[in-house]
Image (tube, helix red, strand yellow):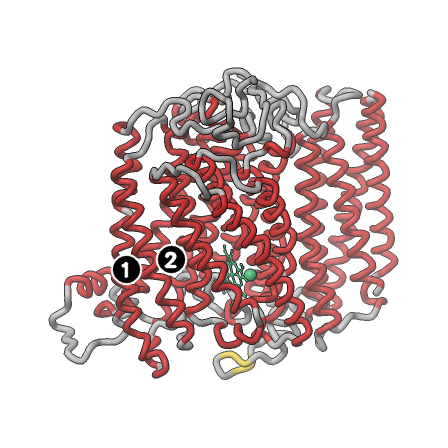
Amino acid sequence: MTDAHGHAGAHAHAEPQGFIWKYVFSVDHKVIGIQYLVTSLVFLLIGFSMMLLMRWQLAIPTPPDDFDPEKLSLIRSFLNWLFPESMPYGFMDPVFYNQLGAMHGTIMVFLGIVPLGVAAFGNYVMPLQIGAPDMAFPRLNMASYWTFLVGGIVLLASFLAPGGAPQSGWTSYAPLSVVAPAGQTYWLIGMVIIITSSLFGAINFIVTMLNMRAKGLTMGRLPVFCWAQLVTAVLLLLAFPVLEAGAILQLLDRVAGTSFYIPKDLIYGSTVFPRAGGGNPILWQHLFWFLAHPEVYVLLLPPMGIIAEIIATNTRKPLFGYRELVGSMLLIGVLSFIVWAHHMFLSGMRTSLASLFVTTTLTISVPAVAILTCLLMSLRGASIRFNTPMLFALAFLPMFAIGGLTGLPLGFAPTDLHLHDTYYVIGHFHYVVAPGSLIALLGGTYYWYPKMFGRRMSEKLGKIHFWMTVIPMNFVFFPMLIQGMYGMQRRLAVPVEQSHNLPVQGWSLIIGIAAATLFVGQIPFIINFFWSLRSGEAAGENPWNATTLEWACPSPPPHGNFATEPEVFRGPYEYSVPGHKTDYWPQDEAA
Amino acid sequence: MSTIAETNTGISHAKLGTWAFLASEIMLFGGLISAYVILRSGSAHLAVPPRSMMGVPLATFNTFALITSSVTMVLALAAIQEGNIAKFQRWILCTIGGGLIFLCVKAYEYHHKWEEGITISSNLFGSFYYTLTGLHVIHVTGGLFLMAYILWAGTRGDFTPDSHDRVECAGLYWHFVDLVWVILFPILYLL
Ligand code: HEM
Ligand SMILES: [Cu+2]
């Protein structure tokens, strides 16, 4: 914080020369944004591949009657060759299943969606939208990326640890996480590093947005995307340190012989675990969820901001209820700190306490619904442009709605007792983060790609990608809601061992096929991403005829972004203003 | 190349950033202290050692040393606001001295307690004691490096009566570290 660039205006650093300084150790928010974009997309692909292996196992969990180890199918012999110990004959060892599950969750949340929504798009777009030449602390920004990368590598390296990767779930519940093999220590250290990175980022975002807005850009004229980033940054700033505290305690429990989460006389492996004891495993759950509930809004708010931008641009109409949207986001930000224990109704809490958290949880769904309503109402009477980003935005709305609505039965303690830790919960939150957030982030990629690289992505490939993503996704996640209501528990490598799961096992085969299709469906996207870099249609400054400031500088913007400091004269979504010569009125256009 | 001459809030980036950083620090220590309070009131096995074993007089002295170093930090800031570099250097040195005394006493205390059988794994109280004060010690150590840097920058002539943001930010941090101790001292030694 106290670097030599202490003062505003000291950021007019010269453009660096040489490949390394320009593209690798760059302090330019745009380069860092693209570094985050590429890195998090790669992590998403890694996390997805892990899940494909798991879905393979769930699709056919046990050898069929006519199984012959001598005549393995192509897939089975490949898996047998790839993981001879953990997937003999292509059937997964439950310990390996747990490792992949824990790593999938951790990677998707902390190394995939959050860095994509917050760090990639936030870094690239937010300074442009506020008309700033860069972030407030460019070097801290670079440090944030490299810390993030190191944290990610530490997490992945846990596969090489004795005993393999962490296997206690992304929630790392004590006391099992304390007695787990060394991989869990990697997880804890990796998390502390990632928390540090996110702290750097959050400070930077907050200061930049509060301090560096262009002349005339009052908070009331700030695009919704920036508001979403601001609320998110505050959540990261205040919630993550609490998980850090929890992680420090768990780390000490593992390496220093403390017993913060170890009860007195814990029996482990049929002997008493040699510890002073007296700690409480539930304490971990509180510290974890104090972060992890706000974290779900960290996963959600930036995508919502993206959706708002895409919808405003492509309906050619002002957003419905700008103030209500922003107000709801602020309210969500506050309320998200007092709902965390709805994840813990089964931990034996008093019913009076449970009622309190039921109440706060139902309260927070009000602003969430308000946001959705504003976005839906924005479509009313619009002549919509159905380009690829807009398709993703339109798909987001109903699928996020499913995600939100399925949360309500979980928020009521009595119904949650049945649904807790079943596939219903998995279905619920995936509807919010995959068909929800991830869809929005893909839409955002199509929307801002022309700004980042100066060329549009192919609409044709984009539309193929869209349908091959949205349809399989629903076949992946909707059946989980059904399986969960039948009582199928999550985190089981062989669910058919319990007879009550047999009636819904058939869905697992369908999910497996859909997941594989989804994987194939990402190929058009990858091709499109690289092909369009050189061969896409040239975009120009403002390919979508949009109003916000990021479209008022060249694509891609040069070092320092704006040739002259922009000045803002109006709100962010002045579309189809009667009497104006075009159907959009950029924020920086003098009247 | 554009520059933004003034900030929207009228507060410098550095100072706003420092406040944000301290907010997150409050949550970090807040999380740990809450864990301590919860287990202290909720666990049947958190045996608090008798006050005589905790060495209250020495810790009181240490509290005094740290508070004094906060005062000298204020004086250092006042000195730079007058543009008096010599005085600034003197007060920063005193601040560093206060921090060093604190660390030395802490090292002695750790050694002594360990000998007495209060170790990080001996029981829950010991675990919390070393964790909370250990994290605080890390913060004090970081603060001392910060002070050394401020001293060096001031000596180099970086600060003037109307431009000394870094001194103020370092001061905010140092007062925060002091404040944490003022909370830790009673809850670990006295109550
Ligand atoms: C509209 C309001 C929402 C309500 C009422 C709600 C309610 C709940 C409840 C009560 C649980 C715990 C279920 C259990 O473990 O038994 C849960 C789990 C979860 N929710 Fe939501 N939720 C809502 C929105 C969201 C959003 C917006 C996200 C993410 C962006 C999200 C992500 C998650 C995640 C990740 C979990 C599972 C955590 C785990 O156990 O691994 N939820 N939700
Ligand atoms: Cu929650």
> The residue tagged with tag 1: helix, strand or loop?
helix
Q: Residue furthest left?
A: A71
- Image: A111 above or below A204: below
Tell me if A510 is positioned left or right of A157 in this view: left
Cα distance between the residues tagged 1 and 2: 31 Å
The residue shown at (48%, 19%) is A15
> The residue tagged with tag 2: helix, strand or loop?
helix
Q: Nearer the viewer, mark 1 or mark 2?
A: 1
Q: Amino acid at mark 1?
A: Ala
Q: Nearer the viewer, residue A81 or A236?
A: A236
Which x, y percent locates residue A391? 36, 44
Q: Nearer the viewer, residue A68 or A506?
A: A506
Mark 1 Cα shell of 10 Å, populated few (<14), some (14-19), many (≥20): many
Q: Are marks 1 and 2 in one subunit?
A: yes
- In which image quadrant can residue B133 be found? bottom right
The residue shown at (26%, 43%) is A524
- Image: A324 above or below A83: above
The residue shown at (70%, 33%) is B15
Q: Nearer the viewer, residue B162 or B47?
A: B162
Tell me if A59 is positioned left or right of A266 in this view: left
> Which residue does the numbered mark 2 point to in the structure image?
A160
The residue shown at (85%, 22%) is B82
Instruction: Give the chain of mark 1.
Output: A
Q: Quadrant of the C terminus of chain A?
A: top right
Which x, y percent locates residue B8? 67, 28
- In which image quadrant can residue A181 be found? bottom left
Q: Quadrant of the N terminus of chain A?
A: top right
> Which residue does the numbered mark 1 point to in the structure image?
A514
Look at the numbered disc 2 and say if its residue's Cβ is closer than 8 Å to ligand 1.
no
Which x, y percent locates residue A6? 66, 27
